[in-house]
Image (cartoon, rainbow, N blue to C red):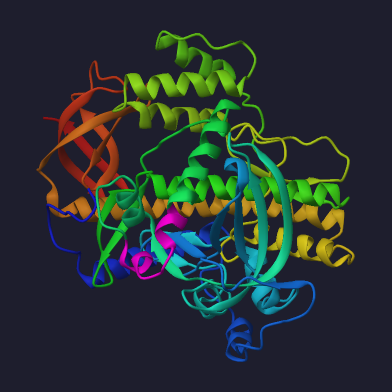
Amino acid sequence: MAGHREYHPAMPADRSNELRSIARRAMLERGLEPDFSAAVVEQVRGLGRGALESGPQLRDLRALLWCSIDNDDSRDLDQLSVAEPLSGGAVRVLVAIADVDATVAPGSPIDAHARANTTSVYTAAQIFPMLPERLSTDLTSLGEDEERLGIVIEMTCAAEGALVASDIYRALVRNRAKLAYDSVAAWLRGAGPMPARAAAVSGMEPQLRIQDRVAQLLKRVRHEQGALGLSTVEARAVYDGGVLADLRPDEDNRAKELIEYFMIAANAVVAQYLERRGCASLRRVLRKPQRWGRIVELARGLGEALPAAPDARSLSGFLVRRQQAAPAQFPDLSLSIVKLLGAGEYVLKRPGQAAEGHFGLAVDDYTHATAPNRRFPDLITQRLLKAALAGRAAPYCEEELRSLAAHCTEQEGNAAKVERRVRKCAAAMLLEPRIGQQFDALVTGASDRGVWVRIRQPVAEGRLVRGFEGADVGDALRVQLTHTDIERGYIDFVRA
């Protein structure tokens, strides 16, 4: 649980260095660059703050009650939000996205590194940022009390939750309060005080409540349309004095939902805007699952019937019922469904061409536009958007977009593999001093290849090498740790 740790102190610094070495090797093995080149370092050294732009196409929205909500330790802030009530119960929501393109010129050394890796890689050992920290945590970050250029996505949400109007434009913005998910979520559910940074800004309390209310409306509509409510257990690295101390479950909460549903809506608006302007775009798609038959089998084993053909709305209803019926087992069901759905990918969308859509979000038009400090596809989309807003020719031709889509998809997969590998190695390292101890565990996998269990402190998965007879997914067991292999990320348990 957050803020509480029951066992050993942080690992020594030399073990953290060992983990960082593993992470760097994993990056290189997967074709990702762990370091910035000398040319990038030289370019960063020459960057100044520069004067903010002005002009008739740039609105001044610095006086609005913008805020950011992100992880406690995040400094690469990509988006701000603010909401304004309208007549009839409608609300106007504004999402401001950091104008990274204003600082990162296409073809520059910084751009070349971002284009090579395509994403920031968040490992348990260290973060490998897509952009140098001088940019991502300063010059191109929407930091607190900083005046910044932004791309604003304006959306009008009707009283029942439907988006009835939208607009996109460039603006000057200023973050009035840098807030964190956990403290905002605790306050929203009445389990904690209002965050001090929010309390210090007059009008921020009703501002956050209206944003929360609209986000929950958007969530309800999304699920009615068939968006999938999945909840897997993700491990979040916790540091103490700069060294890894724990892997804790990174659980969903209401503040994360606020940002999630605003970003889903904003990404859809950007995709539709580029389509209306007759522009080619980079779409984020999740195709209809090829292994739908196995999803049907899983549901049948739980006493439910799903249609023979892939149907997001039916699957969404099934997931809601299972979460209510068996909340403890739901993360593992979610993980099984995630694996069967397959991975999302980036594809070229030519104007007028039929959209492939995103099965998991139940939307036809979807792109990635809201995290340009962290993902290169979002920076590509930002450049396409700014060209469309200014009436200029697109900065990428269709063939280049098609090639970039494939490259971004491949590197995203490589980054995920690096993160997963280092997370396993970190878990093995944290557990090494605890060989012989017993843990409460849940069976997460059972097949001819073996039985796998997960413990929650730290969050770690390992193989049950003895006493696995009769164990099946969802069973609660008491296990004993017998062996770890840090380099390979192996953890072995026996049934206690």
- In this image, 322 relative to 496: left or right? right
Q: Quadrant of residue 451?
A: top left
Residue 492 visible in image: yes
Which image quarter: residue 75? bottom left
Q: Position of residue 26 (x, y in %)?
A: 46, 59
Give the percent coordinates (x, y) of residue 304.
45, 10
- From which residue to which does the magenta span run? 195-208
Q: Residue at x 15, y 33 (%)?
A: 479
At x 36% / y 52%, what residue is drawn?
423
Q: Nearer the viewer, residue 164 or 350?
A: 164
Judge left or right: residue 98 versus residue 424: right
Residue 111 drawn at (x, y percent): 68, 72
Q: Residue at x 19, y 64 (%)?
A: 10
Vertical arrangement, residue 318 with respect to residue 7, above or below? above
Chief secondary structure of the magenta span?
A: helix
| Residue 240 in the figure: left or right of residue 163 | left
> From the viewer's perspective, is residue 337 above or below residue 175?
above
Give the total number of marks visible in the rendering.
0
Q: Residue at x 48, y 64 (%)?
A: 67
Looking at the picture, how far across and down is residue 384, in whole percent? 78, 61
Q: Looking at the image, which is closer to me, 32 or 168?
A: 168
Question: Going by the image, does 414 lie left or right of 290?
Answer: left
Q: Is residue 206 magenta?
A: yes
In the image, residue 393 sits, relative to residue 280, either above or below, namely below
Hey, which quadrant is residue 312 in on the image?
top right
Q: Is residue 451 in view from this perspective?
A: no
Q: Quadrant of the C terminus?
A: top left
- Above/below status of 41 relative to 207: below
Q: Is residue 188 magenta?
A: no
